[in-house]
Image: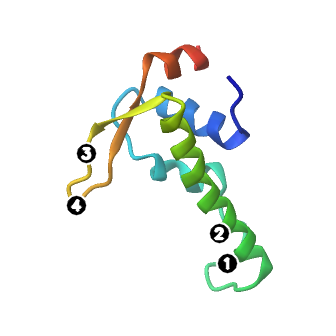
Amino acid sequence: MELSEDEKALLYLIVKAGRPVSPSDYFHGIHPPTFAPSVEGPERDAWVEKQIGLYGAYLGLDQKGLVEVAVPADGRIPDLVVPTDAGRALIG
């Protein structure tokens, strides 16, 4: 199964967590901001695109059956996910 670099990074962190986690908790670690918070412009725009791409990576992992929701969102917390057996097997 082919995964994007973002999907690989996100799946690895979800597997490594060993507990239900919110995928978005890892987004800044995968693509950290490289600019001051007050900066506007192309650098920030590129980073925002990467953050949005990580949501796509999460959806891709779900669609491929590599993660599943363990604790549904309740208005206070987002969905918490765990890897499926297939997701764990892919990471090793």
Under tag 4, what secondary structure?
Answer: loop
- The answer to which of marks 3 and 2 sits earlier in the sequence is 2
**Residue 83, quarter of picture:** top left
- The answer to which of marks 3 and 1 sits earlier in the sequence is 1
Q: Position of residue 18 (x, y in %)?
A: 39, 26
Under tag 1, what secondary structure?
Answer: loop
- The answer to which of marks 2 and 1 sits earlier in the sequence is 1
- The answer to which of marks 1 and 4 sits earlier in the sequence is 1
Report which residue position mark 3 lands on: 72
Q: Residue at x 20, y 55 (%)?
A: 74
Under tag 3, what secondary structure?
Answer: loop
Q: What crowding class fits label 1: few (fewer than 14 Cα within 10 Å), some (14-19), or many (20 or more)?
A: few
Q: Position of residue 79 (x, y in %)?
A: 32, 48
Q: Amino acid at mark 2?
A: Val
Q: Position of residue 89 (x, y in %)?
A: 54, 13
Under tag 2, what secondary structure?
Answer: helix
Report which residue position mark 4 lands on: 76
User: Looking at this view, is 29 or 80 the one in front?
Assistant: 80
Specify how the rendered protein is coloured: rainbow
Q: Amino acid at mark 4?
A: Arg
For the residues marked 4 and 3, what is the alpha-carbon distance in whole angstroms?
11 Å
Report which residue position mark 2 lands on: 48
Q: Residue at x 59, y 45 (%)?
A: 57
Report which residue position mark 1 lands on: 36
* In this view, the mark in front (3 or 2): 3
Q: Position of residue 87 (x, y in %)?
A: 51, 22
For the residues marked 2 and 1, what is the alpha-carbon distance in whole angstroms?
14 Å
Q: Residue at x 63, y 49 (%)?
A: 30
For the residues marked 1 and 4, what is the alpha-carbon distance in whole angstroms?
29 Å
Look at the image and tell me in which quarter the N terminus lies.
top right
For the residues marked 3 and 2, what is the alpha-carbon distance in whole angstroms?
26 Å
Q: What crowding class fits label 2: few (fewer than 14 Cα within 10 Å), some (14-19), or many (20 or more)?
A: some
